[in-house]
Image (cartoon, helix red, strand yellow):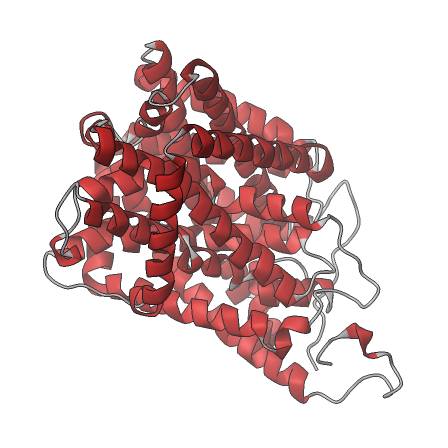
Amino acid sequence: MIQSSVPLKEDRRGRAFGSAQSCFLPALLISLVGITISLAAPDWFRRVILGIRDQVLLQAGWCYIWLDGIFLVAVLTLGFSPWGRIKLGKPEDRPEFSFLEWFGLLFCAALAAGLVFFGVAEPLSHFANPPKFAGVEPSSAASAQWALVNSFLHWGFNAWCIYLVIPIPLAYLVHKRGFACRISSILHPVLGNRIHQWPGKLVDGLCTLVSVGGIAISLGYVGLQLAGGIHYEYGISLGLPGTLGLILLLTVCMTASSVSGLDRSIKFLSNLNVVLALGLLLFVFTAGPTISIVQITMSSLREYILTLPRLAFRVVDGEGSTWMNQWTVMYYAWWCAWAPMVGIFYVRVSKGRTIRELVLAGLVAPVLVDVLWFGVFGGSSLILDLQNKAELAKVVTERGMEYPVFALLHQLPMPSVTVPLFLLLIAIFFVAGGDATAMSIAILSSGGDLDPANWMRVVWGGLQGLTAAILILMGGIATFEATSIVAGFFMVFLLCAALLATVVLLYRESSAKPAEPASVPAAEEELT
């Protein structure tokens, strides 16, 4: 039987101080050293990141794709097999949030910030510049559907399954077995009590460092899009100093939100984001080419589902590998870099749920939302380019990926209202996603305290914003993509270990003798 880890001390003044010495301080110092070097020699630091990226892509680009396909099969198996009935908590534990509130927290903490950036830009980019292996003509009806199908691939099941590889075993161990909420806890079925020694501390420290970089990528994307929207709508060019100042302002808001608590701030912002995003989605759907949106979305969704087994494991050599590395591999690496901190947050808010509920709320439901978002926003932009030559794809190639969503809104009624609302949506996504991940990093660096000290949230929230600003300073989107590939490479090994630990854990649980008499009610629905 699995042994529980040592419980955390409840001394609020010196909360998890021992863990702070072993995890927080080293991770913080290494982060500060990296930031100092990047500020002192940004060109050299950028060359190093790009050089490591090139080697990773050359030697192991295919690895991301195949492992992601394996993760998807594993998560679906866990969710829809008898194991899906296992409760992530004690029999008496009840969920802390309603299903809609819970889904909003999961969604905003994970992908939503990137979704508003790429929802229009990615389909248009594929539409105008499809790779040769796609076999379609640029800017044609065939390339429009191909663009939407591959956007579904990058933001669909293959994206969200990565976020569940860690929280499924970790939530079980934390809420049912009393382990500390640390990434290293998932390795207990494999490493045993060595997770309390240097191997576990190394894993937690590395996850903390990589997560700061992975999260900063998303915040940087959002900061660029917010600055681009202000420029497009109001003609105010913030430039590099203004963009960095904007990110600093949002970082202050993010850290203030994080210290105000999960119920008071993060849940409120997540709910507000869901309402605002749904309102904009409905507006674009009704004000845009509605019938055509339905047609292209349904046909692309059908194609996506039918070809998913092949697409999930698609590896292309030759010239096509450049496109795969720029898009598919970059995305999968980015998701891997996010996985530890998203996993920690999922564990924090999922007590009392079952594995099946977590798979439904963390995989199936988000995919449906992403399909709707890309179908409505991306589909509208593709149709407008096809029907009336709105030249939205030209906006991507000539001005940048942060601009086309605003160009789309100007093709529809009331842009003076919808553009400011979309800018507000971007800002809230920055704050809501950033404070959720700041809480996650604080939980990890505090040794697994589910209510970490406020000063830790402030420190990690500030470092996220600072790192995002540095990435913009070092080259913007190209640097984001390179950093995501490098950061995600280290996390691939952890995800494989987490999957192995899950198999070992479930095998032990399935073969263990029942701890209670046979008369215990079957409503517990646990394999114990």
Percent x, y for residue 478?
25, 38
How many numbered marks have been drawn onto this rendered protein structure?
Answer: 0
- The answer to which of 150 and 484 lies nearer the viewer is 150
Q: Residue at x 50, y 22 (%)?
A: 421
Percent x, y for residue 426?
47, 29
Q: Is residue 71 above or below residue 485?
A: below
- The answer to which of 74 and 25 lies nearer the viewer is 74
Q: Residue at x 67, y 60 (%)?
A: 180
Percent x, y for residue 131?
15, 51
Q: Residue at x 74, y 56 (%)?
A: 8
- Whether residue 411 is visible: yes
Q: Is residue 451 left or right of residue 71?
A: right
Quarter holding the C terminus?
Answer: bottom right
Percent x, y for residue 196?
61, 66
Quadrant in the picture for residue 378: top left
Q: Is residue 320 left or right of residue 87?
A: left
- The answer to which of 16 and 356 lies nearer the viewer is 356
Q: Is residue 380 above or below residue 11?
A: above
